[in-house]
Amino acid sequence: MSRIIRVSLLILALAGFGEADAQSPNNRLKANGMELDVTGLKQAMLGSWESIAPEVRPGAAKNADGTLKPFYLKRAFKYLAADHFELEIINSADPYGAVPLALIRIGGHMLWQGGHPIAPGAQKVNFVADEAYEVTPLAQGFADLLNKVAAAGYAPWAVNTPQSIFGKDFVPFGLKEGTNFMEYDLVYLRGDLLFWGARNIDGRGFDTEQNRPTNLQIPLVRK
């Protein structure tokens, strides 16, 4: 979830969530006319997962030559009982994660949507941020930016001071008051490697079914 050295552009690209209505989790789903049992997959996913190293994503912002600006992040993910999840993302200004800019914490539910054709056992999953959404500036430049573009309804933004943006207007991420946001993603488990979907190379977020990823992202490893 980011961007920078022009902090705002990287952070904007991180939030690929699109509004969606919640639905009840289901252990048996249909894909290609066949019923799939995902109970074993859910059981195997329980626990904590983290990035192997800092990761790169195509951003939504462009360089002067038209190429997409990259943004860098590390993920820490927990899959919990009853399809709850917790996600922490640290966005950095550099590919080695030496200059952290922002910490984003998200909590919510995973909605299972059936099999994904990318690999046997892969599943379409919608991540819905319906429990928590929090931002902590880790660099003064990002705090200064938020005090310009996201001051209304918030205390002054300060380094290492988290604020909840859950259910509120938050211009940098395009969040609107009273809505929950969602990513149309995928998951694929292979041993102790947990894959999500690779970001679209043109910078599109996973904000619609049509934009759901078609390839695998670099995996998380079991913590």
Image: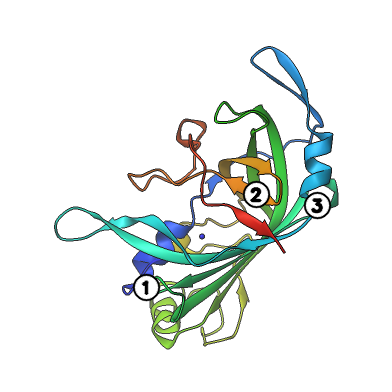
Q: Report x, y in % for residue 222.
A: 71, 59
Q: Foreground: 73 or 61? A: 73
Q: Amino acid under label 2?
A: Leu
Residue 200 seen in the current view: yes
Q: Amino acid under label 1?
A: Val
For the C terminus, the image quarter is bottom right
Q: Amino acid under label 3?
A: Leu
Label located before the other in sequence (3 or 1): 1
Label located before the other in sequence (2 or 1): 1
Determine which quarter of the picture holds residue 204. top left
Look at the numbered disc 3 and give the secondary structure of its residue.
loop
Q: Report x, y in % for residue 82.
A: 84, 47
Q: Nearer the viewer, mark 2 or mark 3?
A: 2
Label located before the other in sequence (2 or 3): 3
Determine which quarter of the picture holds residue 189. top right
Labels 3 & 1 near each other (Cβ < 8 A): no
